[in-house]
């Protein structure tokens, strides 16, 4: 601390800032820089080219961005409000199918069908939410598990909208905002690829959602949600309306999930019920456990790690011929396929983090920060 | 009705199946009074609090707060009318820090909803700053300055009890229900807490309903004491009168045969 007076807060406003220290503000600038530049330099710059080569392509990052949006929504519900939900994939699916239907069949413009997706998610969450007033802990988990199967049934059988088990194309949904079209993105006559323009679109939404949710959790409604998580009876006695806050937590979380679903749809171009099954729901849970429950940046970090892990595993097992793992050419008598190896790694990661670091990567980061803050003392 | 009575409880009966937790209990708390309820374990002291708060619904009787019936109201409504409470075994939000806990006490005084909260600039921010100033006066009053940013779950027990008192106080209540505020505290901490309670009662003019096992403290600070045993009122009066009441002594020490 070369200049201690700079560390002194003299107004409450300074205490309320998100980017409180010069270091954090530098970090914000770096992120902004990376956001703008990454798509342009990804396949040429030495470092990013290496990442690209080992599987971290623009497309991988885009999928991670979609997961990050959904994970922030789930973290609001599970991490902040304490309502564990296995039904997140249904909300994601609802948003995706709405995007497909409203964008293609109704031919609505981007700025209409996207908020429409949000609204659909909000309404579904609003209906499911009150269940949480009566059910707690494991019982709620089982009910939301039921939701996954209910959703799966609807996705497979409401064929006029969802296309049944085969799925439906989302390529018809427009991505135009005024003169900008994210499918044919052009700046000064230079045309970008889909994966590049989608990076700007998706990670822009990640930043927006992260900021809005961060604002919610640091003000009155967010504190009320955390009070419900920590001690619901005490919360009620100081005037927190449990029905309102549990319902709103579900509604907002599911509308963010629907946004993630809509982005997922346009990114993948084609969606089918497999994309919104139990495995996806567990993947979202895994992301927030790994990243850190009750943190926004944890959701994003978790999504980046778990979003890129399958690609890394795929690449490594292809390049190095891991013993016992069949390669993608049909395999040479391995006992595992690459995808089951991925599932095993998922399982191990969830178990390991719950046992060793329940606060996730955000918790590890916190400890490193505290260590340097208090250095050279250990307390 | 006596206008100086802030809380008027008459003939409250509460049953759980065959167990009668409270039987026709009646008492009233005057405005700015420090009223204490004593009694052995299981006498029904905390049950009275839960009836007032709307957590339990008594089968019989009435609970008038400033002339308004509280029985049948939801806990949130009771809080809105100005009833603050602390818990016997701590009702703090352990993962949140002191500031957030106290600001949660101001939940009903604040208005920011999900939408304006998400936007932050404008109403939400102004409200945060304004209410932060309010809770700072409580931090000063209860001498909690060193603990602002720690999750309250990591604070020592005696401090946690004080944080909970602060949270109830930041609701700007007209009556405070304190459920064993000095349980498990040493002599020094007990004296500190008694001092804070008196300060809140005398200087802020908040009526206090106190449940406590620490007889020395109750007898020192209470204006009026009621003794309960097995859900029945056995004595009311000044601390001195109750202390020397034969039925109270019998309830605590057992009947001399």
Image (spheres, rainbow, N blue to C red):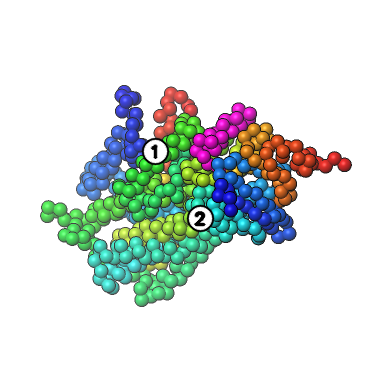
Q: Chain of mark 1?
A: B
B164 or B227, which is in the foreground? B227
The secondary element bearing badge 1 is classed as: helix
In the current view of this chain or complex, which residue is farthest to the front? Answer: B2
Chain under callout 2:
B
- Looking at the image, the residue that sits furthest to the bottom is A160
Mark 2 sits on what residue? B77
Density class for disc 1 (Cα within 10 Å; few <14, some 14-19, many ≥20) is few
Left or right placement of residue B209 versus residue A374 in this view: right
Callout count: 2
Mark toward the start of the polypeptide (1 vs 2): 2
Mark 1–mark 2 distance (CA, rounded to whole Å): 26 Å
Same chain for the residues under marks 1 and 2 in the image: yes
Residue B229 at x, y = what percent? 73, 47
Mark yes or no: residue A296 visible.
no
The disc placed on residue B133 is 1
Residue at 45%, 68% in the rendered image: A152
Which residue is the extreme one toward the left? Answer: A189
Hey, which quadrant is residue A245 in on the image?
bottom left
Q: Please state the extent of the stretch shown in magenta in the rendering.
A: B183-207
Residue visible at 30% across and 69% down in the picture? A102
Which residue is more in the foreground, B189 or A261? B189
Q: Secondary structure at mark 2?
A: helix
> Where in the figure is residue B170, as x and y percent of width and height?
47, 42
Position of residue B148 measured from the top left corner of the image (x, y, whole percent): 45, 35
Q: Is residue A201 left or right of residue A220?
A: left
State the image coordinates of residue A213 (x, y, percent, origin top left): 37, 50
In this view, the residue in front, B57 or A282, is: B57
Q: Is residue B201 magenta?
A: yes
Residue A19 visible at all: yes
Q: Quadrant of residue B244?
A: top right
């Amino acid at each position: 601390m070369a200049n201690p007076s700079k560390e002194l807060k003299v107004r409450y406003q300074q205490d309320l800032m998100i980017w409180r220290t010069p270091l954090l503000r530098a970090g914000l600038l770096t992120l902004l820089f990376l956001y703008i530049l990454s798509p342009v330099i990804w396949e040429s710059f030495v470092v990013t080219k290496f990442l690209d080569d080992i599987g971290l392509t623009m497309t991988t990052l885009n999928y991670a961005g979609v997961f990050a949006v959904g994970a922030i929504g789930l973290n609001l519900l599970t991490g902040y409000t304490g309502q564990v939900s296995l039904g997140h994939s249904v909300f994601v699916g609802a948003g995706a199918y709405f995007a497909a239907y409203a964008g293609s069949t109704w031919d609505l413009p981007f700025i209409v069908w996207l908020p429409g997706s949000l609204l659909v998610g909000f309404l579904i969450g609003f209906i499911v939410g009150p269940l949480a007033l009566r059910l707690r802990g494991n019982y709620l988990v089982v009910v939301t598990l039921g939701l996954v199967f209910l959703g799966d049934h609807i996705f497979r059988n409401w064929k006029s909208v969802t296309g049944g088990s085969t799925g439906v194309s989302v390529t018809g949904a427009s991505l135009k905002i005024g003169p900008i079209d994210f499918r044919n993105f052009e700046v000064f006559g230079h045309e970008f690829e889909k994966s590049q323009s989608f990076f700007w679109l998706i990670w822009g939404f990640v930043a927006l959602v992260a900021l809005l949710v961060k604002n919610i959790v640091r003000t009155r409604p967010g504190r009320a949600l955390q009070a419900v998580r920590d001690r619901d009876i005490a919360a009620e006695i100081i005037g927190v309306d449990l029905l309102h806050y549990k319902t709103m937590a579900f509604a907002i979380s599911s509308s963010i999930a629907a946004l993630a679903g809509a982005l997922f749809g346009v990114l993948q171009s084609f969606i089918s019920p497999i994309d919104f099954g139990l495995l996806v729901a567990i993947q979202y849970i895994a992301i927030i456990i790994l990243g850190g429950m009750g943190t926004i940046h944890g959701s994003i970090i978790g999504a980046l790690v778990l979003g890129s892990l399958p690609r890394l595993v795929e690449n490594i097992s292809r390049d190095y011929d891991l013993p016992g793992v069949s390669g993608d050419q049909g395999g040479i008598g391995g006992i595992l396929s690459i995808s089951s190896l991925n599932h095993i790694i998922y399982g191990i990661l969830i178990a390991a983090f719950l046992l060793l670091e329940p606060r996730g990567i955000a918790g590890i980061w916190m400890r490193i920060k505290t260590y340097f803050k208090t250095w050279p003392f250990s307390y | 009705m006596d206008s100086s009575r802030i809380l008027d409880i008459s003939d409250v009966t509460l049953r759980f199946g065959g167990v009668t937790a409270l039987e026709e209990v009646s008492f009233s708390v005057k405005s700015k009074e420090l009223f204490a309820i004593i009694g052995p374990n299981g006498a029904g002291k905390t049950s009275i609090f839960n009836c007032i708060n709307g957590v339990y619904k008594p089968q019989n009787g009435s609970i008038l707060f400033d002339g308004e019936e509280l029985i049948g109201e939801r806990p949130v409504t009771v809080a809105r009318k100005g009833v603050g409470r602390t818990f016997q075994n701590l009702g703090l939000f352990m993962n949140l820090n002191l500031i957030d806990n106290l600001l949660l006490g101001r939940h009903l005084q604040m208005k920011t909803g999900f939408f304006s909260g998400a936007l932050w600039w404008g109403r939400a921010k102004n409200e945060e700053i304004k209410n932060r100033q309010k809770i700072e006066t409580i931090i000063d009053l209860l001498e909690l300055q060193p603990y602002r940013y720690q999750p309250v779950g990591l604070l020592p027990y005696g401090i946690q009890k004080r944080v909970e008192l602060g949270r109830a106080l930041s609701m700007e209540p007209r009556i405070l229900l304190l459920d064993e505020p000095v349980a498990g505290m040493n002599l020094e901490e007990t004296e500190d807490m008694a001092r804070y309670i008196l300060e809140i009662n005398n200087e802020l003019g908040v009526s206090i309903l106190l449940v406590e096992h620490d007889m020395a403290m109750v007898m020192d600070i209470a204006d009026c004491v009621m003794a309960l045993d097995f859900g029945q009122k056995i004595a009311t009066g000044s601390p001195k009168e109750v202390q020397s009441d034969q039925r109270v002594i019998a309830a605590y020490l057992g009947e001399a045969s």
